[in-house]
Every structure is written in structure tokens, then in C-alpha cells.
Amino acid sequence: MANIVAMSAHHIEVVNLGEFRNRAAELIRVVEESGRPLVIARRGRPVAELRPVVARTRRSREGSVTFAPGVDLTTPVIDADEWEAER
């Protein structure tokens, strides 16, 4: 690739826009396989960044809602005379 710019502990690949146009499929594959972003520059100035898509794992909802043992969810929590809507 064209340039490598050091940013903190990571190395970011930088490629000129013209080179990106010519090698887009190859560069996309490199980003996908390496997991590292690619900065696209026009006349030496960064204008875009190509990043790999991070697959989202589907989280289990098991255990996300818990109820106290013995609680009946079919009965009202407060008495009907306490509802403001009925006044």
C-alpha cells in the first residue's frame, strides 16, 4: 500500500484515492481479512475510512428479566380506588 501512518500503538494504512479506485476489490479484501481500517486520502489529506464490519452476536435474553418467587403478575399492584384515572 502507499503510506503507513503511525497513530499511537496502531498502524493505519493510508492509500491514495486513485490507487483505491484501481485496487478497490483487493483493498476491501485486505481490510476484511486483517480487521484493520484503511484511510483513503485525496492529495495527501484523509477523506474517508474503510472499516471492517464487526459481526454482532445475538445476545440471549435469558435472565434479563426476573421476578420474585410467588408474585402473581395477573393481579393489580394497587387497589382500584388508588388509580387516579378512575377519579
Image: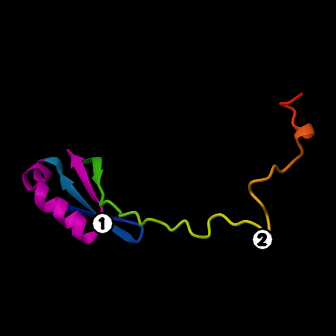
Q: Where residue 56 appears, x then y in whole percent? A: 40, 63
Mark sitting on residue 74: none
Q: Where residue 73 appears, x then y in whole percent? A: 74, 57
Judge by depth and name the residue closer to the eye, 74 or 39. 74
- Which element is circle 2 on? loop
Q: How many marks?
A: 2
- Location of residue 31 by image quarter: bottom left
Question: What residue would you read off at disc 1?
Answer: 36
The residue drawn where x is 62% and y is 65% is 64
Check the image and name the residue furthest to the right: 81
Against 87, is 2 above or below? below
Crowding around mark 1 (Cα neighbors within 10 Å: few <14, some 14 to 19, many 20+) is: some
- Location of residue 66 by image quarter: bottom right
The residue drawn where x is 16% and y is 60% is 27
- Whole-angstrom CA distance, mark 2 to mark 1, is 49 Å
Sequence order check, earlier mark of 2 and 1:
1
The amino acid marked with disc number 2 is Pro
Q: Which residues are magenta?
A: 18-44
Mark sitting on residue 69: 2
* Residue 2 in view (yes/no): no
The secondary structure that most of the magenta stretch takes on is helix
The residue drawn where x is 19% and y is 56% is 15
Check the image and name the residue furthest to the left: 22
- Which element is circle 1 on? loop
The residue drawn where x is 23% and y is 49% is 41
Judge by depth and name the residue closer to the eye, 81 or 38. 81
Give the left or right position of residue 84, taking residue 7 as reference.
right
Q: Where residue 29 appears, x then y in whole percent? A: 17, 64
Question: Is residue 40 located in the magenta-colored stretch of the structure?
Answer: yes
Q: Where residue 87 appears, x then y in whole percent? A: 89, 27
The amino acid marked with disc number 1 is Arg
